[in-house]
Amino acid sequence: MTAVAGASPEFRRLRIPTGRVAAKRPGLAATVGGCLLALIALACIFVPIFWHYSAEAIVAPALQGPSLAHPFGTDTVGRDVFVRTFAGGRVDLAVIAIAVLVSAAIGSLLGVVAASSGRWVDAVVMRTADAIIAFPFMVLVLAIVLLVGTEATVWSLPPGLISLLAAIIVTDWAVYARLARGQTLSLRQRDFVTAARVLGFSSSRIVVRHLLPNVVSAVGAYMVTDAILAVVTTASLPFLGAGIQPPAPEWGVIMYGGATVLQTAWWITLLPGAVLAATAIALSLLADAVLAKIGGALR
Amino acid sequence: MAVQAAPAPPVTQRPRRRRRGVIAQVGVRLGQMVVVTFAVVVITFLLVHLVPGDPARSILGQRATPEAIAELHKQLHLNGSILTQFWTFLQHALTGDLGSSLVAGSLPVTSVVFPALRVTLAVIGCTAVISVAAGLAMGVTSGVSRSGVVDSGLRAIMMVLLATPPFLIGFLLLLFALQTGAAPAGGWGTGALDDVRYLWLPSIALSAYLAPVIARAARQSVQETLGQDFVEAAISRGLPTRTLVFRHVIPNSLLPVISLLGYNMGALIGGAVIIEAVFNLPGIGSALVSAVSARDYPVVQGAALVTAVLVILVNSLSDVAYQLADPRTRVQS
């Protein structure tokens, strides 16, 4: 089957594309994507600190259109959507980072272990992964959020964060396990591994020095793509009554808050949506560039 | 003392590859399907059991009477050892009994899930038609085009569409529907023909995800086909470009595109869940949402199980169909 393109869940079938939009100019795509992402991240850090309104305060009449004082307008209770968008971005970007890193770590470890262990360990880990991948991602995430409950919270984290992270990690490790196992198995057949073995290197040295670095590069490439899935999931869940719970600012929460007044106050939903889309596009450009760079190795 | 010859190092032989017949291939695939389905049933069962605490207590609240909790335990089959519970769950699942809803007048889960699934499948079917048409048009144009501008432009559009969350596109379309009155702003019709009025807008929103996926695959597939000898032969025979594209390139590039539909079943159901919430369609997404907010565990379990089995079925069928249609893909083992 032809390796097909995709920055989304069909990627989960491990049809690794080999660079598309960025195929001709990976440098340019990476620069544009990286700068855009850095810009959004910096705005999320600094706007809530320096903006003259806070994300929780009611500062103006409700449903004011975009203006100089309120570039993204005000929401249904009169909070400043601009500062809420960037304060919410902190939550979204943190969820992406944590969920993707933890899933990747757990999944790669299990994948490498499955590939280098006996038949039974391999079978149990990989059939579990297959079954988790068979569930529609959103359906399993919803079920887990329901079971963990959105009330659970520690420290002063926004309610819903724990169940959201748990749901994404439980569903997401499986893809990394498949990827890491496949990489390990195919790497073991490669000449440089055979060479290392012939040279008499211990198998632990071969795993650590030769297999793992190559698995990490494939896993790292997928992480960028996976981040898109994570951010879209995080922002989608509030529409289903799950995910981060209002009034904590989060892109999905803000957008859902404006859904009922979409016709009169489009800015509440569409302007934070534009920031979300910009984040996804930046990640997509980065993912394409990364895949174009290491694509050959993944074939 | 005679020097003994060192034992020959074990020759690492690659396992002998042997070509399996089509029937055996299909058999292996179906066997895998059964194993994964079983794993899916186990996970669905464990969903309720892995969570710390008593699900009955979390459903009924802290002040529930012991009698009410015992009653709910019985209804959720939470009595006895975990193995007996699993055996009961498996028996019931195999006979198509997924329990009954905790709300909605104790309706059987199947009569909550299946009518909703019908709506979701209607959206997905409509999405598939739109996406294949739009995706092929974009992908083939982009793949055949010798103009860098057309190709880059189309690929940029595909990337933006693919990166934009479908629910955002759903909102834009909903706004468009509200402003122009071109389509009802959500809801569901009264009959099959009436339903189509409600279907097309959500389907376009979901196509914003699927169409670029298909377009990218089509583009790559067309370019690969264009590089093959028979195309060169056709060109050197002086075949007009139009005939070449429609008679030779498109049919030969179609197979991976069609199989993509099968592989994307899970992603499409997940996407439909969100789109349904945006357009207020009574599909599996809405059923899940109301079940989640009512803590209706059996319905959530049932919906997860039914959709996962559907995804496995569609994936396996598209694999088998692909193997039957294209002998080159038959895996040797």
Image (cartoon, rainbow, N blue to C red):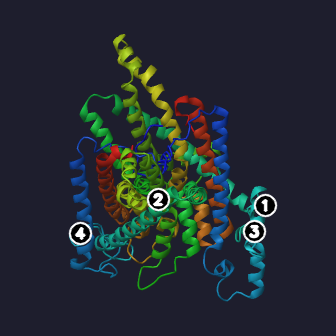
Figure quadrant of the C terminus of chain A: top left
Chain letter behind tag 3 = B
Q: Which residue is mark 2?
A: A112
Query: Which is closer to the viewer, label 3 or label 2?
Result: 2
Mark toward the viewer: 1 or 2: 2
Q: CA distance from mark 1 to mark 4?
A: 55 Å
C-alpha separation, residue under disc 3 versus residue under disc 2: 46 Å
Same subunit, tags 1 and 4: no
Q: CA distance from mark 2 to mark 4?
A: 36 Å
Q: Earlier in the sequence, mark 2 or mark 4?
A: 4
The residue at 33%/52% (across/down) is A287
| Residue picked out by circle 4 | A42
Q: Which mark is residue A269?
A: none
Q: CA distance from mark 1 to mark 2?
A: 36 Å
Q: What residue is shown with label 1?
A: B91
Tag 4: Cα neighbours inside 10 Å, few (<14), some, or many (≥20)?
Answer: few
- Front-most of residues A296 and B183: A296
Distance from disc 4 to disc 3, alpha carbons, whole Å, reads: 52 Å
From what the image shows, is residue A66 above or below residue B189? below
Question: Given the image, on which type of amino acid does mark 4 rest?
Answer: Leu
Chain under numbered label 4: A
To the question of a shared chain for discs 2 and 4, the answer is yes
Please give the residue where the numbered disc 3 appears in the rendered image.
Answer: B106
At a point 40% along the width and 45% down the height, the residue shown is A190
Name the secondary structure under disc 4.
helix
| Observer able to see residue A196 | yes
Residue at 35 percent across and 59 percent down: it is: A209
